[in-house]
Image (tube, helix red, strand yellow):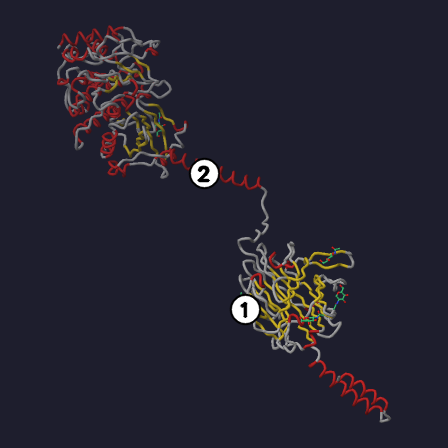
Amino acid sequence: MHHYLHIRSRLSVSSSSMARGQLLQQILIITSLHLISLSTQQETNFVYSNFTSQENLYLDASAKVLLPSGLLQLTNNSDYQMGRAFHKKPIDQSITSSFSTHFVCALAPKPGVEGGHGLTFLVSSSLDFSFAQATRYLGAFNASTSNVLAVELDTIWNPEFNDIKTSDGHVGIDVKSPISIAVAPSSYYSDTRGKNVSVNLLSGNPIQVWVDYEDSVLNVSLAPIEAKKPSRPLLSQRINFSDIFPDNRSELFVGFSAATGNAVSDHYILWWSFTTSKGGGGGSQLDISKLPRVPHPKPLPTVRPKAPRKKLPRWIIGLVAFLAVVTLAVLAGVCFHRRKKFLEVSETWEKEFDAHRFSYKSLYRATKGFSKDEFLGKGGFGEVYRGSLPQGRQIAVKRVFHNGDEGVKQFVAEVVSMRCLKHRNLVPLFGYCRRKRELLLVSEYMSNGSLDEHLFDEAKRILSWKERLVVVKGIASALWYLHTGADQVVLHRDVKASNIMLDEEFNGRLGDFGMARFHEHGGSAATTAAVGTVGYMAPELITMGASTGTDVYAFGVFVLEVTCGRRPVEPQLEGEKRHMIKWVCECWKKDALLDAVDQRLGDEFSPEEVEMVMKLGLLCSNIVPESRPTMEQVVLYLNENMPLPEFSPYTLGIGTFAPVLVDAASLVVSSASWSWSASSSTNHSPYAYQARDQPWGQTIETKDSLHIVLEPEKPKTQTLSSAVKAVTLPAEDLESNLSSISSQR
Ligand SMILES: *[C@@H]1O[C@H](CO)[C@@H](O)[C@H](O)[C@H]1NC(C)=O
Ligand SMILES: *[C@@H]1O[C@H](CO)[C@@H](O)[C@H](O)[C@H]1NC(C)=O
Ligand SMILES: *[C@@H]1O[C@H](CO)[C@@H](O)[C@H](O)[C@H]1NC(C)=O
Ligand SMILES: *[C@@H]1O[C@H](CO)[C@@H](O)[C@H](O)[C@H]1NC(C)=O
Ligand SMILES: *[C@@H]1O[C@H](CO)[C@@H](O)[C@H](O)[C@H]1NC(C)=O
């Protein structure tokens, strides 16, 4: 009506003859006024390029505008939500004849989660949607009918609502109920490709939707954001508006709704234009570059695909692991080896001796790992090595291997107590160390070796008589000290030339304390084996055991050894010379005592001195213990402070060689149980002799000395080095000696 009037007035004005400029101005003002009134009353046009300004918006339920992007969010990713947004102002009745709307939406599910349920464009007679339900009712309907026209972008297949099953969602037209009266898979007709192209509603990407109504036909189209409006609508459906909205007078509202259920999506409207003018819309006003960005929901941590980490090749990992294992194994092995190498045995009873204990490690270092270069010799019971302690002190380390730990305690106690013994003719003992089956004795290093080297080793300088006398006097003094000078009586048990060491001034020093005894203890404690060295053992040793007297006997043999320069028993010599004591006595009987003197001394000696010393040797080696002097007396005789007692080579017990003297009683009693068997493998030895029926025991020859071990119960050859040879002295000598001794008794 106004329109016509306006045109008519314009025509009338243009036909008048008034001043043109004035008239034109008037006309323009009138025209613009009329246009404004037209748009407010007869047409509705609006564009939401974003939703930052919310004054024209009616937001319902969970719908909200995200700032600062201005993105309209109908629902977030929570479940069972619905949200609605309407243009607040009602649209006038012209909508019933035609309208066009164009909007951009996005449905963004979480990756890996089923998206849903979808959104609708709504034309409603009311803003009151309290009846509406979420999930499949899309926040716009309930089970009953309501005065609503909806265009749905549905992402869930609900067959009862005429939905169609597609992988990308579907588009439908719903009138008064969620049951679609028209439905199509979400797609668009592409002119360029000449076919329908599917549009995934849940891609999260912006989608353009066009809804056009004219001449009772509702067309619906959609397309990706970059595409133009399709030339053919996806849906074209005849709609009777007065059927949907019976009350012609009622106002109508336009807007959107969306809902989630089990399946959730973010539902967004990015841009929206609406017009009721015929042929309006068309999407020309859409500027894609100004659209707010759609936030893509962060993936759930549980379903988040793992960031493709740079993976090392398997073989490298394997190699590294292998190397690590090998390194660990080697380290562990080294540690274990070191531990084992330096492992010591220490028991609680040793606590009190701690001060005298050396660590195996320090001894190992001092002897350069018991190297061959430091090897000094093999003694009766062990190997001796030279060593130097960090302070530069020279030591000798004797390594004794033993089978059992029995007797070790007593031996260690004795060793430690011997530390307290101080005499210039004793080898100073520093301490000990103990390992499994191994005992180490640390003493001072004697630079000039042992006495027997200087008596029998042709390579060494032969000692003069003066030097020999000094040594003999020194050893006598040491034994005197041991027997009487210390707190308790100390028995050496193995006095012989090879156990006497020479210091740098050629002083004799008695060493190897208690070794024989230790060896005895090393065996079974039940046995009462007499241990010593054949030729040096007093005959009563077997029955009476060790005493100061047995030490005196050995000293006597030693004195003769030094004077005669020969060993007590030399089996290779013929007849009377074989046994030193016997021979010396024979010489005396012939009144030619000096015949027995070491020929190597020449005549550089005092005959009186030598004769006196030889007689003293015979006196000490008397087989009758009571007839032997004490060490105190020996020292007095040697220093000529006291003359030797009167005795002759025919005196009872003088000059009688008896390796062992077994008295008749013990012989009878024990002969049945004694077992004598030299190892058969050693029978080839020139001195080997099967003493199976002989009661005086088994003698064992080592490199430089003869040891005798007597056992009442069982042979104990296993306690001795397997390298030793079983040897006994010629049978007839032993028998004759024994019978002569027996008859003398
Ligand atoms: C649907 O909503 C209407 C009001 O619009 C109400 O009367 C009706 O009871 C509701 N139906 C259901 C099933 O909720
Ligand atoms: C394209 O889709 C429409 C609507 O679903 C359908 O009617 C038409 O047959 C389809 N055309 C092609 C080529 O698939
Ligand atoms: C709806 O689509 C048909 C063709 O499918 C077309 O002829 C008609 O003009 C369209 N109407 C509107 C309002 O776009
Ligand atoms: C629309 O529906 C109303 C009432 O339901 C009816 O009177 C009218 O004839 C219908 N118009 C068309 C074009 O179908
Ligand atoms: C004895 O020891 C001293 C000092 O160590 C040394 O000078 C001398 O050569 C040694 N004598 C012999 C015979 O070894």
Element carrying mark 2:
helix
- Looking at the image, residue 93 sits to the left or right of residue 264; the answer is right
The residue lying at 72 percent from left, 82 percent from top is 38
* Label 1 lies in ligand 1 vicinity (Cβ under 8 Å): yes
Quadrant of the frame with the N terminus? bottom right
Instruction: Measure the C-alpha gap from mark 2 to mark 1.
Output: 78 Å
Label 1 is placed on what type of residue?
Phe
Label 2 is placed on what type of residue?
Leu
Quadrant of the frame with the C terminus? top left
Tell me where residue 75 appears, x and y as whole percent.
57, 65
Disc 1 crowd, CA 10 A, few/some/many (<14, 14-19, 20+): few
Q: Quadrant of residue 423?
A: top left
Residue tagged by mark 1? 131
Q: Is residue 261 above or below residue 631?
A: below
**Which numbered disc covers residue 229?**
none
Q: Quadrant of residue 45?
A: bottom right
Question: In front: 453, or 385?
Answer: 385
Furthest residue in direction bottom, as rendered: 18
Ligand 4, seen in the image, is in the quarter at bottom right
Task: Please report whichever mark, 2 or 1, sits nearer to the chain's N-terminal start.
Answer: 1
Tell me where residue 355 appears, x and y as whole percent.
27, 39
Q: Is residue 524 visible?
A: yes
**Which numbered disc covers residue 331?**
2
